[in-house]
Image (cartoon, coloured by chain):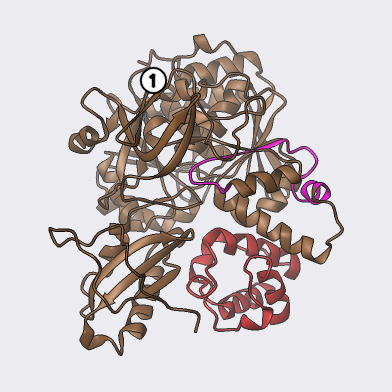
Amino acid sequence: MNTSELKTLQDLVLLSAKERPDKVYLREKAGQEIAEKTFGKLAEDCRKLASWLSSQGEGVLHAGLLGTSSIAYITSLLGITFNGHVAVPIDPQLSPEEIMDNLNRADVTVFFYDKRFQALIESMRSACPQITSYVCFTPEEGVFSLTELLSQSAPAEPAAVDPHQCACILYTSGTTGKSKGVMLSHANLIDNACCCDNEGSDSDIMLTVLPIHHAYCLTCDVLLTLRYGATLCINDSLIRLMQNIKLFKPTKMLLVPLMVETIYRRIMAEKKKNPLLPMKMIGRAVFGKDLGVIFCGGAYLNPDLTKAYAKMGIPLLQGYGMTECSPRISSSSLADPSTGEDVGRVVKNCEVKVEDGEILARSPSVMLGYYKNEEATKEMFTEDGWLKTGDLGYVKDQRIYITGRKKNLIILSNGENISPEELENYFAGSEWMAEVMVYSEEEQITAEVYPFPEYAGKAEALFRKKVEEINKKVPPVKRILRLRLRDKEFEKTTSRKVKRIQTGEKGRLLSAK
Amino acid sequence: MLEKIRDIMTRYVEVEPEEIKEDTKLAEELGLTSFAVMSMMGDFEEEFGITVDESELTDIYTVKDIMNYIEKKQA
């Protein structure tokens, strides 16, 4: 595909259909069968969706999407953006209150959802009064569905779309608790999908595993396969990842470090039982003979894992980025692999520099800003317009090395960004507790508490109970896995704030009962 | 059943099988991440011939919860 012709997501959809109308773009399990959609059919459905949307209100509409990856989800997302409307993918793991809050804050008026959220729709009608149209991804009794929408709409003519207008609003964890809506334009996303040369071909089969409301999945799974005319297979659930690898036989996958590590741990447990089996054979048995590479990003990756996967004959290539940068800032390829120490080479069109130890980036992929949050947007940029990544590190020969985090944000190995304050706030109102701090220790969310001395005897039981309560409220990825109890106050700054970086001894680790 | 569950769980955490008891908490005591729990459920699917529904996993906190879940699915 001649990438110089690409300006908008509409161009990407139309050009891929023109080049390979009958080739399969999307593939997913549908009961015992496999459902497919070609590039040609995708373009037709996007035009139909655009035509239906134009009847749903004046001007640019914001359409929310709630669910996990599916052919219907991807079709809806690309259909929404096709003629210039804005897609707002929502994290399905959030609580109903957070889901509705995100939709309201993004001014969503049209809502596409997975049938398992049907029960939520009733409460949404009063909590999100601005939403006037609801579309279920699959046909269900008594509700309007995408299937109906497509069957009753005539394809719209492609309308002129300004490449610099917002295409998507993606929510990302803020350091102060409330998530922020990152506005990415068509130009941002196209630039990022084209920021590396020769990174794909039409013989690629990708299995999409990461959550679709993340920029990494959107750009590197959905858009890159469109660009190269490759096939994207959908992993319907993390429960069946290993089975789906066997079923779809992917040649490439994008994973986060946590997945790479968990799969490796499982492999090594098998290896213990059959110590004579060569690692390459085990690698083939687990990943199939077609898998040529795994791309890994979103969080710190232990270099030992890169070496371990190499022994299995599977190159593990690292990249680096953030939602605000659509997301790639650096990337690596088979021809130019990361060493395990660095996170790849700075991508095309992107400039990177280091100021006061912090990595700053400037590129056509950098977001328009946070939706309706000028103050937060301003804070993310230097006065001369560089994006502050919040990561500490250095650049050598255009390769990026990360050494730490400047901002107070926990980045778990599954790529989830978690604000410690958000979890700490759940402890508010515990009369037995004087101070709490949440941080990541050995990749696990840890809560450390200093109880009031008069509660010292009961503190452990109260602490355990509180954490259980919190863990029931938060999505599974945010659960607190480690507990530490201290008998001394936390170290404080001169303004009596708890210091985020404590130099003294840690509290006692509460072990398994 | 506990025996088989223990065997699969030790693929994901480095503990002696006997340390895994019915009331052992998956997150707080074994440090299992939500992804490890999901992968494990995939193994249980194959081992016990059940179909796991991802949305039902939010109520699983202990080994006993897993056992109850599998029994319910097998019924």
Q: Quadrant of residue A356?
A: top left
In x, y percent, where is residue A201?
A: 68, 22
Residue A281 belongs to the span the image colors magenta: yes
Position of residue A184 relative to residue A17, above or below, is below
Position of residue B66 relative to residue A308, above or below, is below
Residue type at the position of mark 1: Pro
Residue A488 belongs to the span the image colors magenta: no
The residue at 65%/18% (across/down) is: A21
Position of residue A367 relative to residue A263, above or below, is above
Position of residue A459 relative to residue A127, above or below, is below
- Quadrant including the N terminus of chain A: top right
Residue B1 visible, this angle: no
Q: Which chain is brown?
A: A
In x, y percent, where is residue A376?
A: 22, 38
In x, y percent, where is residue A39?
A: 62, 24
Residue A406 visible, this angle: yes
In the image, A392 versus B6, the foreground residue is A392
In the image, A449 versus B72, the foreground residue is A449
Look at mark 1 in the image and give the residue it sits on.
A364
In x, y percent, where is residue A94?
A: 39, 55
The residue at 66%/83% (across/down) is: B18
In the image, A198 versus A449, the foreground residue is A449
> Is residue A314 toward the left or the right of residue A419 in the image?
right
Q: Which chain is red?
A: B
Q: Which secondary structure, mark 1?
A: loop
- Tell me where the magenta segment starts and ends, as one range: A280-302
- Which subunit holds the residue at mark 1? A
Return the residue found at the far right.
A276
